Image: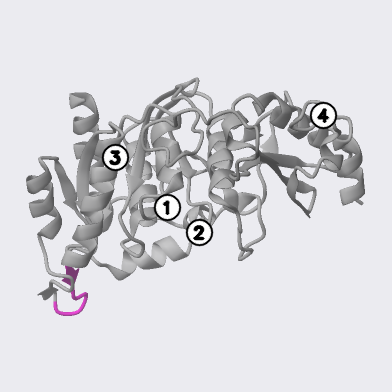
Amino acid sequence: MLTKEAVLAALSRIPGPDGKTPLPDGGAIDGLTLRDGKVFLAIKVDPRKANMLEAMRAAAEGAVRAVPEVTSAIVTLTAENAARPGDAPAAKPAPHSHGRSVPEARAIPGVDKIVAVASGKGGVGKSTTAINLALALVARGLRVAVLDADIYGPSLPTLLGLEGKPSIAADGNKLVPMEKYGLKAMSIGFLVEPGAPVVWRGPMVMSALTQFLREVEWGAIDVMIVDMPPGTGDAQLTMAQSVPLAGAVIVSTPQDLSLIDARRGAAMFQKVNVPVLGIVENMSYFLCPHCGGRTDVFAHGGARHEAEKLGVPFLGEVPLDIVIRETSDSGRPVVASAPESAQAKAYEAIAGELLKALRAG
C-alpha cells in the first residue's frame, strides 16, 4: 500500500530550494496528497527563483514516480510571496504577469495550432461549444486534441463520457492522453476523484497547466482546442504567455450581461497579443420542438453586433436546444452522436469559419 512515508523517503534524496537541505526537512512541502496511486505534491518556493528551481521540481517528480505503487505524479511549484530581509530586489515581471513568474512562450512539439475557447463568465455553454467545435474539426479530417484547462471545474470527462486514468508513456516521463471520438483529451478531472474539490493557489494552477502542456505525449496534432476556465485570471495569462496561441474564440450568450464579460475576455487576450479569432453566440434562440415557434430567450444578435464593434469575425450561432444538453450530459456530444442533425450542422459551420480565421492569420 502506498504511504506518505514512502513518498517522503524518496524525496529525502532530493535537495530542497536551498540546494542542500533534503526536500522534506526544509519546510518547503506545501501539500502532499495520495489517491489510488496518484501523487499530487506542491513545493513552496520564492516566486523570483521559480525558473531556476524547475530542475528541482522535475527531480522530485521523477523520484516520486519511481516509488513502487505510484501510477502517476504531478509536482507543482507554489509561491511564497513574502520578501525576506537581505533578499535581492525582485526582477521586473513580464507584462500582465501580476508580479508572478511566467514561463517563456514555447511551441509544443508536434502541435501546429493552439486555440483557446474562452468566456468572460460561466454558464454560457463554453465547454459544450469547445467539445463540439473540436469534434467538428475531426469530422473535417484534422488531428485534434482537447485540453481542459479549467482546473477548478473540469467538465471534459463528463462531456466525452470518459472514465479511468491516463497511462504513463513508455519513457516514464509523460502522460498519455485519453482518446474518444477521434479526440485526444487531457483534464485534471482524469486524475482526481469525481466531485473532489481542487483547492490550489494560483501559482499551483499555473504550474499544473504548464505540465499538462509540456508533459503529455500529444503526438502530431493539427489543432489543439483549450477549454479555458471562465473569467480573466491566472489560467488565461499562463496559457497566453506559455505557448504561442494561434488565437482565442469567445463564447457568449446574446444578453447584455454576458456580452459585457465577453468584451472583457476579448480585451484581455488582445492585451497579451493573442488575436481574437471570433465570437460565437450560444443559446442564440429556442425553437419549440412541438410547434416550431421561435423564442429569443436571451435576446438575439448581441454577439454578432459585439463582434462588429470589436472588429473581429462573427463565427456563428448555436440554438438553445434540449438535444445539445442531453447529449452533452450523457457523454455523447451532438456532433459525434448525431452528425446529420441541425444542431451538429451549427457547430460544423462555426468550425468552417474558425478555419478561415486561422488561415487568414
Question: As drawn, is 87 to the left or to the right of 40?
Answer: left
Which sits in the foreground, 295 or 209?
209
Query: Badge 4: few (under 14), some or many (20 or more) residues near its Cα, within 10 Å?
Result: some
Numbered label attached to residue 229: 1
Tag 2 and tag 1, C-beta contact below 8 Å? yes
Return the disc, 2 or 1, that comes first in the chain's sequence.
2
Query: Badge 2: few (under 14), some or many (20 or more) residues near its Cα, within 10 Å?
Result: some
**Magenta span of residues:** 285-291
Q: Secondary structure at mark 3?
A: helix
Question: How far apart are the two marked residues, 4 and 1, measured between alpha carbons?
Answer: 35 Å
Query: What residue lies at 44% left-to-right and 32% top-to-bottom?
Result: 93
- Type of amino acid at the residue the image marks with label 2: Gly
Query: What residue lies at 38% left-to-right and 26% top-to-bottom?
Result: 244
Question: How far apart are the two marked residues, 2 and 4, measured between alpha carbons?
Answer: 34 Å
Q: Position of residue 148 (x, y in %)?
A: 48, 47
Question: As drawn, is 223 to the left or to the right of 273?
Answer: right
Tag 4 and tag 1, C-beta contact below 8 Å? no
List the residue tagged with mark 4. Answer: 15
Numbered label attached to residue 153: 2
Which sits in the foreground, 344 or 101?
101
- Type of amino acid at the residue the image marks with label 4: Pro
Front: mark 2 or 4: 4
Question: How far apart are the two marked residues, 2 and 1, measured between alpha carbons?
Answer: 8 Å
Q: Is 239 part of what is drawn in magenta?
A: no
Question: How far apart are the two marked residues, 3 and 4, measured between alpha carbons?
Answer: 39 Å
Numbered label attached to residue 269: 3
Return the disc, 3 or 4, that comes first in the chain's sequence.
4
